[in-house]
Image (tube, grey):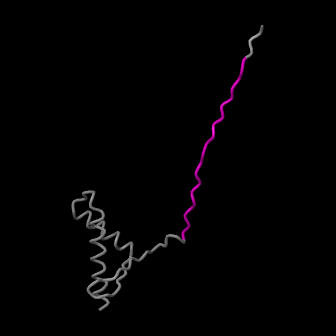
Amino acid sequence: MPKSTKTTQSTTTTRTRTRKPRTTSETPDTQLSATVIPETGTTAAVDHDAVAQRAYELFLDSGARHGRDLEHWLQAESELRQRSFITRN
């Protein structure tokens, strides 16, 4: 009696995720960060690029030690807001 052989086929399904492409309208070239200064109740807007530049300078001044990026960013924002507020008044 002849042997019957069974052939099994395996199917592989590949899942791919599609990502929504970013549009340039979502991220403007110059972003402003506006916050209310508690002492005066006024709003001071600072340029995102200016904050980034000042935060980088603070990073270099601290010996280029990593791990204090948020501290540098917040200090840079604060300094630039104060300068902006002083020059407006």
Q: Position of residue 62 (x, y in %)?
A: 21, 62
Toward the bottom, the furthest residue is: 89
Range of magenta residues: 5-24
Q: Is residue 10 above or below residue 65?
A: above
Q: Residue at the far right: name it.
A: 1
Please give the count of numbered marks on the rendered protein. Answer: 0
Residue visible at 29% across and 72% down in the picture: 76
Could you tell whether 72 is left or right of 47 in the image?
Answer: left
Q: Determine the image quadrant of residue 37.
A: bottom left
Quarter holding the N terminus is top right
Query: Does the magenta run of residues contain 12?
Result: yes
Which residue does the image show at 52% across and 70% down from the upper left? 26
Q: Residue at x 27, y 66 (%)?
A: 71
Q: Is residue 30 left or right of residue 9?
A: left
Assess whether residue 38 is covered by the magenta stretch.
no
Please identify the quadrant where the C terminus is shown. Answer: bottom left
Q: Position of residue 31 (x, y in %)?
A: 43, 75
Front position in the image: 15 or 33: 15
Nearer to the camera, 64 or 27: 27
Name the main secondary structure of what is drawn in magenta.
loop
**x, y percent for residue 81:** 31, 80
What percent of the width, then of the height, locates residue 61? 22, 65
Residue occupying the point 27% across, 77% down: 79
Considering every residue shown, the one lying at the far top of the view is: 1
- Quadrant assignment, res 15: top right
